[in-house]
Image: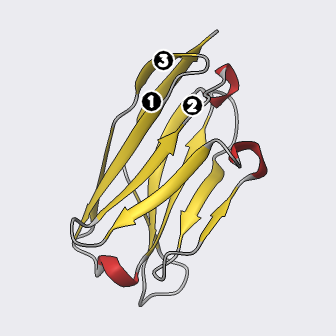
Amino acid sequence: QVQLVESGGGLVQAGGSLRLSCAASGIFFSVTVMGWYRQAPGEQRELVAVIFSGGGTNYADFVKGRFTISRDNAKNTVYLQMNSLKPEDTAVYYCNAKDPLIRGRDYWGQGTRVTVSS
């Protein structure tokens, strides 16, 4: 059974930083594409960043230069370092894993809330 457990959310002032973590289990982590998505109130869930098994990354334009996604395969954990946070970054952040064997099958964490005050 695949489990993704996020942590690290909270309340921070604009300009501040947070680091989100997502611990994965039940999946062959080192070959799994991992990502972070977010969903603000009344909005659709959107991609924030993705990291491939080889370490390559992609970012949404609205976080480029501010957020960094990374992974530690020894710890089965993916991170999202968020710097220069803005009030518009306020959302629930979800960890995502793409099943390496079943095309189109995704797994999600329960989400961690990030609130950025102005």
Q: CA distance from mark 2 to mark 1?
A: 6 Å
Residue at 47%, 48% (x, y): give it: 80
Residue 77: where, in percent of width, then height?
30, 61
Amino acid carrying mark 1 in the image: Arg
Q: Is residue 38 above or below residue 69?
A: above
Report the side of 93 relative to 86 (left or right).
Answer: left
Rate crowding at label 3 as few (under 14), some (14 to 19) or many (20 or more) other CA atoms within 10 Å.
some
Q: Quadrant of residue 26?
A: bottom left
Determine the secondary structure under disc 2.
strand
Seen as rendered, the residue at the extreme right is 61
Q: Looking at the image, is mark 1 or mark 3 earlier in the sequence?
A: 3
Q: Provide the residue designation for mark 3.
A: 12
Q: In this view of the protein, can residue 111 be seen by the observer?
A: no
Q: Are marks 2 and 1 in contact (CB under 8 Å)?
A: yes
Q: Provide the residue designation for mark 1.
A: 113
Residue at 40%, 42% (x, y): give it: 20
Amino acid carrying mark 3 in the image: Val
Determine the secondary structure under disc 3.
strand
Q: Is residue 63 above or below residue 33?
A: above
Give me the disc on residue 91. Answer: 2
Residue at 53%, 86% (x, y): give it: 103
Amino acid carrying mark 2 in the image: Ala
Using the image as rendered, state which of residue 23 and residue 40 is in the foreground.
23
Q: Looking at the image, is mark 2 or mark 1 earlier in the sequence?
A: 2
Q: In this view of the protein, can residue 108 be seen by the observer?
A: yes
Residue 98: where, in percent of width, then height?
47, 74
Residue 14: where, in percent of width, then height?
61, 17
